[in-house]
Image (spheres, grey):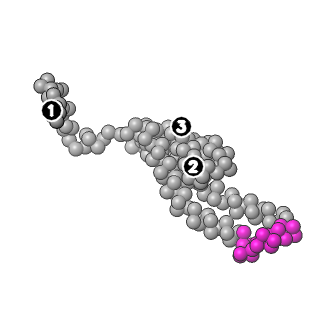
Amino acid sequence: MSTRRHLPILREASAPPSPPPSTPEAAGDAEPPPWHWIPLGTTVSLVGFALLAQGAAALSVRLLGRVYPLGATAAQVAHIRAAHPAAARSVELTAALIPVLALLLAVAVGSYVVGRRGDRTNARHGMLSGGLTVMIFWVVTGRLWSLLPLVPLAMALGHLAGRWGVARRDRSLAAEG
């Protein structure tokens, strides 16, 4: 049987631990780095879309129900499209745009929160939050390629909403001080 080996113990003096903060307020004042607000804004956007998605889907179904009967077969849909092509296509396009608008609204709210609440954030952080939100939806939907054109649109909207949030934050700080 082999002999048992022990790890050596170092007897050198280690650096003294850093002193605790003098007050509890000093420990809570440490603002996270600005880039931490990017995933926080994305989380706000995801939760916001989760709240808006059910209403957007219900509205889309109601719009489609104006042209197509409930439970329509493929043959019935083809017949309605042939009889009224302009009405059918416009309703389909409108019904498809409603969830996209709900997603962009959620991105705008999340990016606004990034600009408004982050102490050192800027419009770029809102832009990155918007792009990250759509990329997460792209991955979650099984890499649905039709979502990729929304990335630059969400980034531009996120930049504008983040800029608006920063302007509101700066205005409120100027009014306080």
Q: Which mark is residue 139?
A: 2
**Mark 2 or mark 3, which is nearer to you?**
2
Residue at disc 3, secondary structure: helix
Who comes first in sequence, dot 3 or dot 1?
Answer: 1
Q: What range is drawn magenta here?
A: 64-83
Say which residue label 1 marks. Answer: 3
Question: Residue 81 at x, y = what percent?
Answer: 83, 67
Q: Residue at x 19, y 37 (%)?
A: 20
Q: Along the line of sight, which residue is nearer the eye, 124 or 103?
A: 103
Residue at disc 2, secondary structure: helix
Q: Spot the residue most to the right.
A: 83
Q: Spot the residue most to the bottom.
A: 70
Q: Along the line of sight, which residue is nearer the eye, 79 or 31?
A: 79
Q: Residue at x 69, y 59 (%)?
A: 96
How far apart are the two marked residues, 3 and 1, measured between alpha carbons?
A: 61 Å
Q: Is residue 160 left or right of residue 35?
A: right
**Mark 1 or mark 2, which is nearer to you?**
1
Q: Is residue 27 above or below residue 139?
A: above
Q: Is residue 6 left or right of residue 141?
A: left
Disc 1 to disc 2: CB gap under 8 Å = no
Say which residue label 3 marks. Answer: 124
Q: Is residue 26 above or below residue 79?
A: above
Q: Is residue 72 left or right of residue 101?
A: right
Total labels: the figure holds 3
